[in-house]
Image: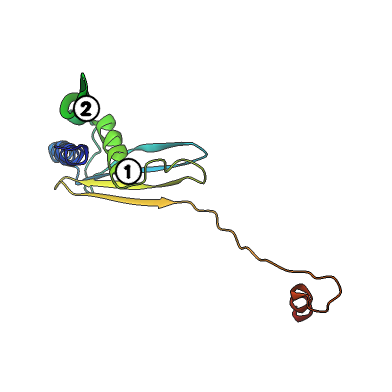
Amino acid sequence: MNFNTQLLAAIHHNIAAIAAVLTLVEAPQLCIEYSGCGDSGEAEGVDLDWPEGTEPKSVTHAVEWMSVFHAVYGESSTFELRTKTVPFDQACEDLLNMVIEQSGHSGWENNDGGGGSMTVTAAGALTLNHFDNVTEQDHSDYEFHADDGEDEADEVLQAA
């Protein structure tokens, strides 16, 4: 399998693992917001939604995390899926980074930056809402000529 195929397999596995913890603690969903610019950005914490009237619980569960490992054997290489156990919050933030990269927004924190949010439900659905900050420029060109009476700038200035 190629890298993208294995990365998608890892993303699906990790969504299911996080959804299983949400089901276990009876939280319908979680949300992570992230933002940044100027070459630095971060997730702003994992927020779990609790049903009305339910006391929020501390989530200390571990998650079996799956990642893609690039293995090099002499002159050949391959991509392998590997698992390890990580804390719940770390798994959520790592999943956020994985889906940002897979969706084509890696480097979102550079220059003007960007941000967004990721929601994962106990049913195993993931939604990424991402925005990029963009600086626009309004550009104008004017020509000036030596006393030939055809200055574009003169026409613009007279019309103003």
What kind of residue is marked 2?
A: Phe
Q: In this view, does 43 lie to the left or right of 76?
A: right
Q: Is residue 41 left or right of residue 159?
A: left
Q: Nearer the viewer, residue 112 or 58?
A: 112
Labels 1 and 2: the sequence-earlier one: 2
Q: Can residue 80 be seen in this view?
A: yes
Label pair 1/2, CB-CB below 8 angstroms: no
How many numbered badges does the structure rendering display? 2
Query: Mark 2 highlights which residue?
Result: 69
The image quadrant where one finds the N terminus is top left
Q: Which of 80 and 49 is in front in this view?
A: 80
What kind of residue is marked 1?
A: Ile
Residue 116 rendering spot, x and y as whole percentages:
38, 48
Q: Nearer the viewer, residue 48 or 53?
A: 48
Q: Is residue 23 left or right of residue 142?
A: left
Quadrant assignment, res 55: top left
Question: Which mark identifies residue 100?
Answer: 1
